[in-house]
Amino acid sequence: MEKELTGLQVYKFGGASVKDAAAILNLKHIVETTAPGQPLLIVVSAMGKTTNALEEIFRLAYAGQAYESQVEHLKEFHWAAASALNQEHSATKASDAENLYNAVDEHFEELDQHLAAVNPRGDYDQQYDQIVSFGELLASRLVVFALSLHHQTTWLDCRPLIRTDRNWREGHVNWIITEAAIAKVVPPLLAAGPVVTQGFLGGTVKKATTTLGREGSDYSAAIFAYCLRAEAVTIWKDVAGLLNADPKLFADTVRYPEISYQETIEMAYYGASVIHPKTLKPLADRHILLRVKSFLDPAAEGTLIHDCQHPPLAPAFIRKGGQCLLSFESKDFAFISEENLEVIFGALAQARLKINLMQNSAISFSVCTDYAEARVQRLLALLQGQFRVQYNSELVLFTIKNYDQASIERLTAGRALLLEQRTRHTFQFLVRE
């Protein structure tokens, strides 16, 4: 088994790299030209904006509103991509095309069943996971079909393998069970040819679908790489590598040719959009190389992330929208003590609000979190008896990693800062959207 997996590569393709038939054919070209003869596991996201569409469909179903036309539009979109892939290769066996169409139909039939069972009195997050998971299932079917034209390729349902708890929308992985399952099932499949599976998804012991957090397909690739002791993971993006800023938001971006696990973990934690925050730890634990490369220019160098030392890096600019500033004051004007903080942190954990920035004074404590109305309201309900709580939403958190004075002046010029914080290597500030 170990011999079969020598040099194992894990490729992860995001939504932009499988957005339509042309993109999937480009994926096929990348696989054939960059990993010939090597054992290869491919993790794919949903096509384009499919996850957003499924979120809207679920929102309508949960609210008791009509969603059928949106489902039909999504079905037509996937059917069109399947048809285009089939027409691209006239040598396709009729049976292969029929298998693809049947698989797409079966997924949509199952989606219809889940939507019909949506209960507005049921757990929102649990039902959410069952619906939005279909994007990855559908995309992986199309990718397998494209690759199977010239290679034996296996479609693998990741949900029975990546075992999680019932923490819906951000399942916690049971690593012992997951590693045992993946190590048993996957190596024989890889010996026969490329294996295509889904990102973002996991499953519970009772076979319910879970998701690993928005943009969690990177994490899925890391899970498989860790469990299979892969040589490297490559994340294929629409950018030249790991950049010091989002090129859609900042001009004159700089590519990091090489960067350490630690630096990348911190950038991901602060909200850098290239890599999911949980991706790095399992790779660093087993010294698995991570590459970020462009699917638009596969031959380009990209970025190598590994255990390394490097000179000081160019400042990284990270923008995180959709933020909320929550401020807590004790009702009796007592100091914000350790006991008070314990209560606040406990309530934040119960409401599943993650802290992106925090600051305290004598009688108040403020945190910046991602904004989610239902979770904020739950927090208020938990704390209203003990604290006065005020909050502002529609804020933006900027982080400058490895800052200098020029970089601070560049980002703060002309902005009214609601809150700012400076550490040895990081400068953060909060502003209105």
Image (spheres, rainbow, N blue to C red):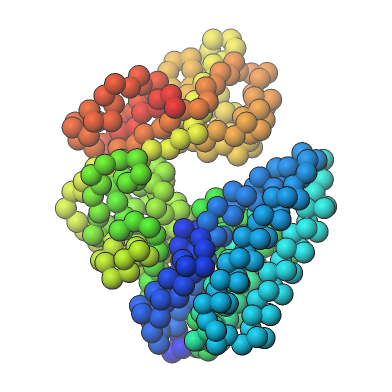
| Residue under the point 82% across and 53% down | 116
Q: Residue 206: x percent and y percent?
A: 76, 63
Q: Is residue 183 visible?
A: no
Task: Give residue 270's position: percent from left, percent from top.
Answer: 40, 42
Q: Which of 47 and 181 is in front in this view?
A: 47
Q: In this view, does 224 lie above or below 149?
A: above
Picture mark count:
0
Q: Residue at x 55, y 60 (%)?
A: 47
* Pick the front one: 284 or 319: 319
Relative placement, left or right, of 252 versus 152 is: left
Residue 118 in view in this figure: yes
Give the camera-side residue of 41 and 184.
Answer: 41
Could you say where residue 169 lies in the image, as x and y percent from the top left? 63, 50
Q: In this view, does 234 lie above or below 115?
A: below
Q: Is residue 66 shown above or below 21? A: above
Q: Which residue is drawn at 23% across and 31% down?
A: 410
Q: Left of 110 or right of it: where is 155? A: left
**Residue 424 lies in quadrant:** top left
Quarter containing the C terminus: top left
Is the residue 120 above or below the residue 296 in the image?
above
Q: Which residue is drawn at 65% across and 56% down?
A: 74
Return the residue nearer the eye: 182 or 12.
12
| Coordinates of residue 42 in the picture (x, y in percent) | 49, 72
In the shown orientation, is residue 258 left or right of residue 187? left
